[in-house]
Image (tube, helix red, strand yellow):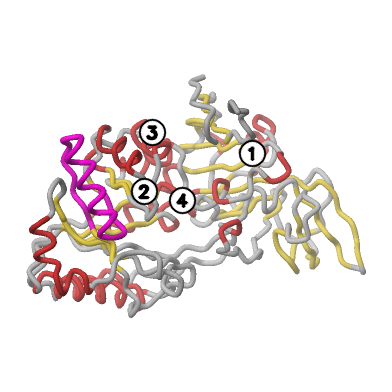
Amino acid sequence: MRRHSPRRPVKEKWIASQFGDSLWKSSPACVQCSIIMIAPSFSRELLERYGSPLYVYDLDEAERQAKALFELLPKGAQVLYSVKANPLPEVCAALKNAGCRVEIASLLELEVVREAGFAPDQIMCSGPGKTASLVRDMLVAGVTHFSCDSWYDLERLAGVASATKKPANALLRLQVLGAPSGSVGVGAMQSHFGADPAELLNSGAARVAALQGAELAGIHIYSGGQIQTADKLASTFEHAIHLAEEIAEAGVPLRLVDLGGGFPWTFGTSDDPVDISALREKLQRVNAQRRLTAEAKLWFESGRYLVASSGTLLSTVLDVKVWNGKPHIILDTGMIHLGGMAGLGRIYRAVASIEPLAGRDGALLQSVDVVGPTDYALDYVTRDASVPALKPGDAVSIPNVGAYGLTASLVAFTGSQPPAEVCCRGSSVVAVHRLRTGHERIRA
């Protein structure tokens, strides 16, 4: 087992043995997880082997989603996977197989994507809080593309690139206050993200010409996440392209235009995903409007749309009790494993779908509240869920949790061991990881 530096939470990895071919199949008795069907026998085998709770990721599904997204985009467009959505090396490698690049924000993520096989020129370093040491380490590792959050950030990149004699291509991130925003986005709260477009429109040509050490390759615009219709997505991208055209008209050459993402997918429920199939035709019309930036490459970003449907959280009922006439189901998972960014104020509304592995056929349904294992009042998974009667020891699944699941949760709260994370292809287990947390004593 390869050991990583203990200075920060990392992943332990070991390769697991393969299961029989019959364990993944499609049948009416299977637990539905978005598109894929997971045989209950496979789920139980995994739980017996790796314990409960347990995250399971279908790498084939991640590749399918990536290919589906590419089909919606203009020919030649690139997709950058936001590694923070799910930083497992095998997940990243699956998306590399599907043709994606990656967007990272830390040296640990750099280590992950290099293990996944990404070349330095397939990596973009982004984030508003980059330090000079981070930039230096990225440049030394061969990373050449950076999203810069301000002119100061851009000039810092140029200075470090000059000192290290490494090439650096910058995309200046811009605020887009007039663009449509998503329901889980930065639109209404993004005042601290990006530079004012006026800085490029008014004096950008001169400032770019004077820049030493780095090249301004383009602009980066991100209007929000979970944008709920194809029309709103297309409008967001159209707004960004119009801004790029204005900047090019002001004399700032652009060879890259990163339009961000916002592609929606459900989180933790079995609801049908938003249909954005109409986006393809709409984007073709928007792309045809480009004149001064017609030769610039288009980049898009996604995390949730690419990997959410690949993930299932398996859990076990610990207790069932009745309070004021209503059953309460206590699971061995909750906000500590499925926080949905709650720790950052991006609150996940606890309305997860609970699917018993035993199935629902012919079972009498009852309304229950499902809560997690901690003694914190906000630790509930869903309220008023309609499920068959459950008893301690029963196993359940929660679908569509492949993005912003474990690493976006309060994993250090209570000090419980995080669940294992299993990556599968068909009926084969490719790799298993466990996130390590806890305090390392350092010298006073």
Look at label 2 and name its amino acid: Lys
Query: Which residue in the protein does label 3 denote?
Result: 111
Residue 99 at x, y percent in the picture: 27, 46
The residue wearing badge 4 is 85
Whole-number angstrom distance, CA of label 2 to CA of label 4: 19 Å
- Label 3, residues with CA under 10 Å away: few <14, some 14-19, many ≥20: few
**Residue drawn at x 31%, y 45% as measured from the top left:** 98
Distance of label 1 from label 3 (alpha carbons): 22 Å
> Mark 3 or mark 4: which is in front?
3
Residue 173: percent from left, percent from top: 28, 62
Q: Nearer the viewer, mark 1 or mark 2?
A: 2
- The residue tagged 2 is 130
Query: For residue 87, which numbered disc appears in the image?
Result: none
Residue bearing the label numbered 1: 419
Distance between mark 1 and mark 2 Cα atoms: 31 Å
Residue at the spot 35% in from the left edge and 50% down from the top edge = 81
- Residue 207 in sight from this viewpoint: yes
Q: Earlier in the sequence, mark 2 or mark 4?
A: 4
What residue span does the magenta drawing correspond to? 146-171
Residue drawn 30% across and 38% down? 138
**Badge nearest the viewer, 1 or 3:** 3
